[in-house]
Image (spheres, rainbow, N blue to C red):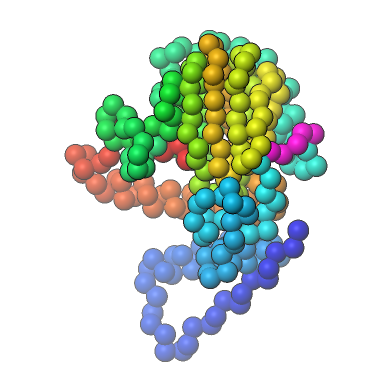
Amino acid sequence: MCAPASPELATPPADAATPTDDEAARAAAKQSLHAKLGADWARVFGRNAQRKLGAVAKPPSSWHLNPPETYYPLLEATPFWQTPSHSSRVQEAVDLLERFHPVILAELQGLRESALNQYRQAAGTEGRELSVDGLTTLLHDKGDWRVHYLQLEGSDTAESCRLTPKTAKIVRSISRAAGHALFSVLDPGTHILPHCGPCNHKLRLHLGLVIPDGRCCIRVGDQERSWSEGKVLVMDDAFEHEVWNDTQAQRVVLIVDIWHPDFSNAEVTYLEETRAARRRRVDGREGAMGASDAPSGAIDAK
């Protein structure tokens, strides 16, 4: 897939002010990444520049409800991706999870209920129920939704991974995994409210582990699907979606995010390095806060 050419980086005038240490460090990091990516730089930087500057991508559909600047252009958008997939990048991840389904299921069955945490979002979502501590909001209005994280966008999940080491190893072995993986447990009667993921540059894989009979399904955009035990359902969570478990039993899936297959490996490198740099800046700011000022208890799953 072709991407727009990168805009030329302007040469500063001779009388330009001397850059600060931070500006110089950022420029050096960009130059280092430029050298590493070589010919792929135009595709990577061009797409990111287009996203940031004026030419933001239009939402791919009326089911994409986030601000336009959150979307990357030129990425295939469909609520569910068929399997076998026309994309080898997607199919490799699907095949790996399905092959190790018995191992993952056995480890799930050994996981204690006390290892699960209620799924919560940052507070401030209007009209949603607050969690018990008042710091976060719930994304479900009936039943209960609990999770066990294996990866969470760079957060420390070492303790969780020690409880499910084989599954954690399987997830780490997935090529182009995007740093977000969890067991997702819906109690009987649970309804997850309509919502959109924060971006369109990932796909979400659901491996069916415990799927009860009855109405237990997910709507993505205007399409509805259910899960099958041992099989992977591939969805694009940038579309509005909601979930029902209207049965008398728990529903459990393993969720793993992968980078969108339309991204080249060079673009994935760029996205991972910029995300890591952003995480370091956030950690640096939090480290500078006093212990009494630091927020606690919030889980930012998205």
Quadrant in which residue 79 is drawn: top right
Q: Is residue 103 magenta?
A: no
* Residue 236 visible from this viewpoint: yes
174 horizontally vs 278: left or right:
right
Q: How many numbered circles are shown?
A: 0
57 relative to 13, above or below:
above
State the residue at coordinates (43%, 69%).
24
The answer to whether residue 178 of the structure is visible from this angle is no
Where residue 53 sits in the image (x, y, percent)?
Answer: 53, 69
Q: At 25% from the left edge and 41% from the top edge, which residue is drawn?
A: 294
- Figure check: 97 above or below 262: above
Q: Nearer the viewer, residue 29 or 164?
A: 164
Extreme residue in the left direction:
292
Identify which residue, 301 or 24, lies in the foreground: 301
> What residue lies at 76% left-to-right and 58% top-to-bottom?
1
User: What secondary structure is the stretch in magenta mostly built from?
Assistant: loop
**Residue at 61% over, 74% down:** 7
List x then y, in percent, for residue 96: 72, 28
Is 11 situated above or below 271?
below
Q: Position of residue 302 (x, y in %)?
A: 47, 40
- Residue 81 magenta-highlighted: yes
Q: Position of residue 167 (x, y in %)?
A: 59, 23
Question: Which stretch appears magenta?
Answer: 80-84
**Viewer-closest of 214 and 287:** 214
Of 166 and 211, nearer the camera is 211
